[in-house]
Amino acid sequence: MSNALPYAEVIGDPIAQSKSPIIHKFWLEKLDINADYRACHITSDGLKDYIANRRGDKNWRGCNVTMPHKQMVMDHVADPGKVRHSIGAMNTIARDEQNALFGTNTDAGGFFAPIADMELAGQDVIVIGAGGAARAVLFALSKIHVGLVTVVNRNALKASVLLAHFGLKGQALEHGATLPHAKLLVNASALGMAGQDELNIDLSMLLDDAVVYDLVYSPLDTRLLKAAKKRNLETVDGLAMLIGQAALAFEIFFGKAPPLEHDDELRKLLLV
C-alpha cells in the first residue's frame, strides 16, 4: 500500500468488530476515489501519541472514534463547534483548511435520521446507557422536544447528570428497576454486543406502537430486537445509525457525499 495514498480510519479498543472500513471503502470504490480507510486499535494509554503522530501525517484525512475514546479525545483536538459543552463527546476528527485537527460529532445526526419521520414531540422515551453514544442520543432528543426521558444505567447518578445537562425532564434508574410506558426505547449501551453482557429487559411496558432502536450492530439481530419483534413492535437496527453517522463523516474526510442510493447493496455487504 502506498504511503502517499490519502486515508482515514476508525480507532477504538476493541476495534476488530468495526464495520466502518467496509462502509467507507464501499463508498470510495463507488465514487472512484483513490483513497483508503482502515481500522486501528488504539488503547486509552496510546490515544495521545496516536493523535500526535497522525497530526504530522499529511495523507491522514481524519478518523472516526469509537469506544472508549469519545470523551478523552476532546482533550487533544480543537473544538470549534463547542461539542464539549453540547453533546460532550466526539466521534469524528478531521483537518480544517489550515491543517489543524478539530473534532465534531456525527452520531446525533446519524441516530436521528432513521426516526426523523416519527412524531416524537411530547412522547416519552427510554434510553439505556450514559456513555458517548447516549450523549448523542440525548442531544438529538433534546432538540425535538420529547416528553419524559428515562435513562437507565448502572450508575444512576451519572444518568441523572446527563438529563440535567441536556435540559431533559425525566428520571434516572438503575438496571432492573420498573420502567415506565414509552413510545421509543433506545439501547445506547454496549450491552448485547458480542463479547459484552446481554441486555435483559422486559418490553411489556412499551406502547403497542412503540419503536425499539438498538445501536448495537454486532450482532445485528440482538436479543433486544428479537424480543421487540415478538411483540410486533417496529425496530431499528444498529446499521441504520452506523451508516448515517458514517455518511456525515465520509463527506468531511473526502469532500464528497456518499452514494446513498446503494444502501441496500451496502447493507447486504455488511451482513456477510
Image (spheres, rainbow, N blue to C red):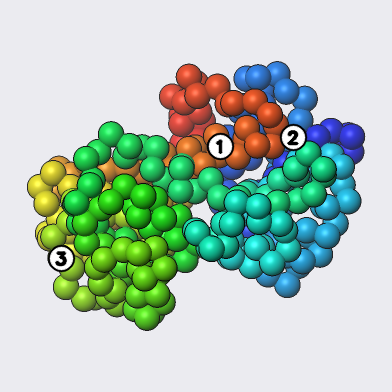
Q: Residue 53: where, in percent of width, then height?
A: 85, 57
Q: Earlier in the sequence, mark 1 or mark 3?
A: 3
- Residue tagged by mark 1? 248
Q: Quadrant of residue 251?
A: top right
Q: Is residue 272 left or right of residue 256?
A: left
- Residue tagged by mark 2? 36
Q: Residue 69: where, in percent of width, then height?
A: 62, 63
Residue 182 visible:
yes
200 or 144: nearer the viewer? 144
In what element is the residue under mark 3? Answer: loop
Q: Residue 23: where, in percent of width, then height?
A: 58, 35
- In the image, residue 256 sits, relative to residue 271, either above or below, namely above
CA gap, disc 2 and disc 3:
46 Å
- In the image, residue 237 sits, relative to residue 53, either above or below, namely above
98 or 138: nearer the viewer? 98
Residue at 13% of width from left, 44% of height from top? 209
Q: Quadrant of residue 94?
A: top right
CA gap, disc 1 and disc 3:
34 Å
CA gap, disc 2 and disc 1:
17 Å
Give the amino acid type for the residue marked by disc 1 in the picture: Leu
CB atoms of marks 2 and 1 within 8 Å: no
